[in-house]
Structure formats: structure tokens, C-alpha cells
């Protein structure tokens, strides 16, 4: 019996795309860097976790800025990272998971967020859209480790005192979200918002596909 629902945040609860990256401009300008490099910074951050392993999957600000510098051949200061993270707190303009759906689900299940980003930034975004009252906790990659690694997800389940059979994950990325659930033996729902998220090359089990978040109320 499902008791707990884990939601990804970006592109599942709140839309995140390249247009949001313009928020990085002020951070770059503050430190005297070329603000027109904002899109390259966005791409670098998106690529940051590509070399993660089961043994090393914790988000780290110092490692991230080092990766960005190497990826872009730059010499950005460590302090820039804090401003980039703070800029991402403003990415709240386009809500995907509407409040009526969240509210109804919260009446039946314990709701949590598991995000591959930094905790404080994601908490701020959820507070800004007024959803804090629905989610019991945000689990983040800088504290617990990142999806899809089994060891990271196991830390979360152990803390909650629950088992995979009592949980379900909803996310938009098959290689991270759905694979994370599959790796630990949990059912999941793939939000395939553009018809391209269900990558056939990624082999996972125990998931269903939805095109619209309203379908959650029929499934759950």
C-alpha cells in the first residue's frame, strides 16, 4: 500500500528551462564577469553530475564551481557559486503541479520532494509558491546524494522508517528520477510533458507514463 509520494522538483513541480538562466546575469555582473556567458553557465551546471558515482554523488559547491571552470575554461571565484544558487531561487514563474492536485494528494499521502539540487534554494522556491504546507520535507542532493543512486535514496527511506513498497516517485527524467525508483525497487510515474522523456534506451521497470499532471488523481 502506497503511503509516501516523492516528487522531483524541476520540470515536475516547477518548470525549469533555459529562459530562467537569465537570472544568472546579475551574479556574473556582480563579480565583473561577462554576463552573456549566463547560458553556458546553465549548461555547465546541468552537466555537473554526469561523472557522479555510487561512492561520490553528493552535490558540493566547491566541486561544482571547479567543474564549471573546467567545462567553460574559466576562472570563476568560489563566491560566485553562492550567487548562482541564490539566483536559482527566483525560478518560480511556471508552476506545473497545480495546487488543487497537490492539496488532494496531501489528504491521502505523505508528500516529499527529492531534488538533485541544493536544499536551501529549493526550499525557498517551494515557500515562494506557497507549497510548504503540503510537503513534509525536501530531500536534496547536497545532503543525501543525488538520483539515481540507490545508496542516496536508501538514506532517505531509512530516515523515514519506510520501505520501497510503501512509496512512489513522480518525476520527469527517466535516467534519474525513474531509474532512482527502479534501482531501489519502487514504483514510479514518468511525467512525459513533451513526449520525449520516455527514453527507450534507459531500461527501468515498475513505472507508468502520464502526459498531464491531472492524471495523477486518476492513478493515485
Image (cartoon, rainbow, N blue to C red):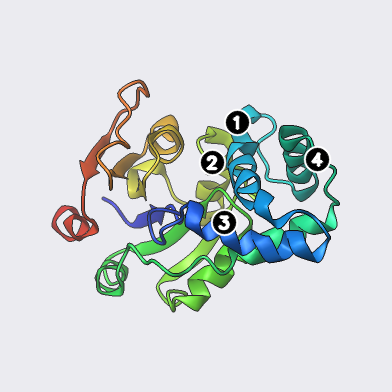
Quadrant where the C terminus lies?
bottom left
Q: Which of marks 1 and 3 is nearer the N terminus?
A: 3
Give the number of the disc on residue 119.
none
Alpha-carbon span between mark 1 and mark 4: 19 Å
Residue mark closest to the camera, 1 vs 3: 3
- Judged from the image, the secondary structure of the residue bearing numbered disc 3 is helix
Alpha-carbon span between mark 1 and mark 2: 21 Å
Q: Mark 4 points at which residue?
A: 74
Residue mark closest to the camera, 4 vs 2: 4
Alpha-carbon span between mark 4 and mark 2: 36 Å
Question: In which quadrant of the rendered view does residue 213 lie?
Answer: bottom left
Q: Which of marks 3 and 2 is nearer the N terminus?
A: 3
Residues at marks 1 and 4 touching, judged by CB atoms closer than 8 Å: no
> What residue do we see at 42% from left, 45% from top?
163
Question: In which quadrant of the rendered view does residue 99 lie?
Answer: bottom left
Seen from the viewer's position, the closer of residues 111 and 17 is 17
Q: Mark 1 points at which residue?
A: 50
* Image side of residue 204 versus residue 155, left or right: left
Question: In which quadrant of the rendered view does residue 152 lie?
Answer: top right
Q: Mark 3 points at which residue?
A: 21
Q: Which of marks 3 and 4 is nearer the N terminus?
A: 3
Q: Which of marks 1 and 2 is nearer the N terminus?
A: 1
* Image side of residue 163 versus residue 148, left or right: left
Alpha-carbon span between mark 1 and mark 3: 20 Å
Amino acid at each position: 500500500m502506497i503511503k509516501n509520494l516523492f516528487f522531483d522538483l524541476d520540470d515536475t513541480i516547477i518548470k525549469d528551462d533555459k529562459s530562467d538562466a537569465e537570472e544568472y546575469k546579475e551574479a556574473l555582473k556582480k563579480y565583473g564577469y561577462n554576463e552573456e556567458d549566463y547560458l553556458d553557465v546553465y549548461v555547465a551546471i546541468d552537466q555537473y553530475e554526469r561523472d557522479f558515482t555510487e561512492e561520490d554523488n553528493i552535490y558540493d559547491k566547491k566541486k561544482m564551481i571547479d567543474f564549471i571552470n573546467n567545462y567553460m575554461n574559466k576562472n570563476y571565484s568560489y563566491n560566485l557559486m553562492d550567487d548562482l544558487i541564490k539566483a536559482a531561487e527566483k525560478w518560480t514563474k511556471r508552476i506545473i503541479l497545480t495546487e488543487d492536485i497537490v492539496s488532494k494528494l496531501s489528504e491521502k499521502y505523505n508528500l516529499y520532494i527529492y531534488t538533485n539540487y541544493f536544499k536551501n534554494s529549493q526550499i525557498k522556491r517551494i515557500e515562494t509558491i506557497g507549497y510548504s504546507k503540503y510537503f513534509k520535507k525536501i530531500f536534496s542532493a547536497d545532503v543525501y546524494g543525488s538520483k539515481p543512486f540507490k545508496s542516496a535514496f536508501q538514506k532517505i527511506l531509512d530516515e523515514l522508517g519506510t520501505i520501497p513498497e510503501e512509496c512512489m516517485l513522480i518525476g520527469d527524467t527517466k535516467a534519474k528520477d525513474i531509474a532512482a525508483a527502479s534501482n531501489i525497487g519502487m514504483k514510479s510515474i514518468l511525467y512525459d510533458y513533451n513526449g520525449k522523456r520516455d527514453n527507450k534506451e534507459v531500461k527501468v521497470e515498475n513505472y507508468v507514463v502520464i502526459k498531464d499532471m491531472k492524471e495523477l488523481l486518476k492513478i493515485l
